[in-house]
Image (tube, helix red, strand yellow):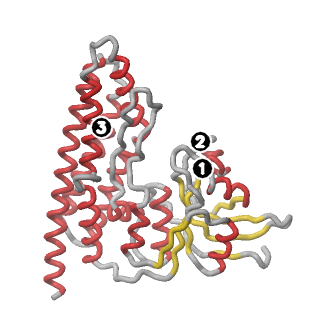
Amino acid sequence: MNNNYVMINLENHIIPLVDCRTLAVTNILRYDDIDFDSEELFALSGGLDLWTLPTSPNSRIHYVFPRNMYAEIEFLQMLSYDLTIKNNVSNSDLIAHLHNGHKLIVDADRFYLPCFVEAFGAQHFGYHCMNIIGHDTSVSGDSLFYALEFLSKEHVHYADDDLHNARFAECAMHSPQGRTYIISGKPGIDVDNSFIYKCLLETTTQKLDSENGLLKNYQKVISTLEKAELCIGQTLLEKYAKNQLRLLEAAIKETDPYCSAYRMAHAKGMKKIAEKCSNNNLWLCADEWEQIAYRWQESIAKKSLSVPLKDKYMFWKSFLLDVKDTEIGLLNKTSSIVRAALSKTNCDAT
C-alpha cells in the first residue's frame, strides 16, 4: 500500500441476506451502531412489492422489478443522515469522498464485475449496488477499489476500469449512470420504539396507496390476464393469450425468489421488530406474512403443470385474486396494530 491508500472501516454483515441493496444500507447502519439487520431493515423500509406485466402482445419477456429499489435509501433519509445522491460521479470523485471520510454506496451492472461473472456467468443486472470502502494503487500504479459484496465476508477489490464500466454501463434493466449515495455524519434522531413504529406505519401506508401501492400492481396484472383470457378459443387471438400466459409464468419464475423470499424476509424482519418492541399482535401478523411466503413458493411448483390453457388461466387468476385480498388485509391489519402501538407509546412518553 502507498500514500494513496484510504479505507473506511465498514464491516460486511452478510447474514441474514435479503439482497445487495439492503446489505449495503445495513452495513452503514451497523457502522454507526444502529442495531438493525437486513431483514429488519427490509420490513421497515417497505421493500415488499409485486412485478407487473407488459401489455403489448409482442413484448419480449419483461417485468417491473418487484420492489422499490430506493426504499432503503429513503430509510437513511428518515434517519436524518446527511445524504447526497448524485449521478455521473467519477471514480476519481469516489477517491476524494473516501479521503473526506464519506460512506459510499454505488449502483453498478454486475456484468462488468469479475467476481459476479465467475459466480453467476456474464449477465447484465443494472440494479446491483455495493459499499465502496477504500482505494489503493498497485505496484504498477493501477487504481484498486475495495468494496463490500454479498459474495464475501471480506472486502473484494476491483480494478479502476472494471468499476468504471460497471458504474456507467448502458444496461437495459436500469442503467447505473454513475449513481452514488454519499453519506456523512451520524443519524439525526433517536432510534427508539416510536421511530420504529412511525417507519413501519409510513411504509405500510405507502403499500396501501390507491395509485402506487401493492393493490394497484395486483390490479394491473389481473386485468392483463382477464383481457387475455377472453382470447382463448379465438383462432386469431389465442396466440396473444398464450403469449401473455408465457409472460406471466416467466415473470413469476424470474421474480421468485423475490416474491416468496421478499415476503419471507418481510415476515422475519417484522417478527424481530415485534420482539424488540414486545408487541405480540405484530408478531402474529408477521407469522401470517410467513404463511403467504409459503403460498407463493407452492404456486411456483404448480406453474409447470401440463394442463389446458384455460385451466392455467383459472389457476393463476384465482391465486392472484386470493393472495391480493390476503396481502391487502394483512397490510390493513399491520396499520391498525402499529397505529395502536404508536398511540400507546406516545401516551406513555407524556
Q: Using a 10 Å C-alpha cutoff, classify the residue at mark 2 as few (fewer than 14 neighbours), some (14 to 19) or many (20 or more).
A: few
Tag 3 secondary structure: helix
Q: Nearer the viewer, mark 3 or mark 2?
A: 3
Q: Residue at x 40, y 67 (%)?
A: 74
Q: Residue at x 39, y 61 (%)?
A: 71
Task: Name the residue carrying label 2.
Answer: 123
Q: Nearer the viewer, residue 65 or 191?
A: 65
Q: Nearer the viewer, mark 1 or mark 3?
A: 3
Tag 2 secondary structure: loop
Measured Cα–Cα span from mark 1 to mark 3: 29 Å
Q: Quadrant of the N terminus?
A: bottom right
In screen coordinates, is 109 left or right of 143?
A: left
Q: Amino acid at mark 2?
A: Gln
Q: Report whether residue 154 is seen.
A: no
In screen coordinates, is 118 left or right of 251?
A: right
Measured Cα–Cα span from mark 3 to mark 2: 27 Å
Task: Name the residue carrying label 3.
Answer: 221
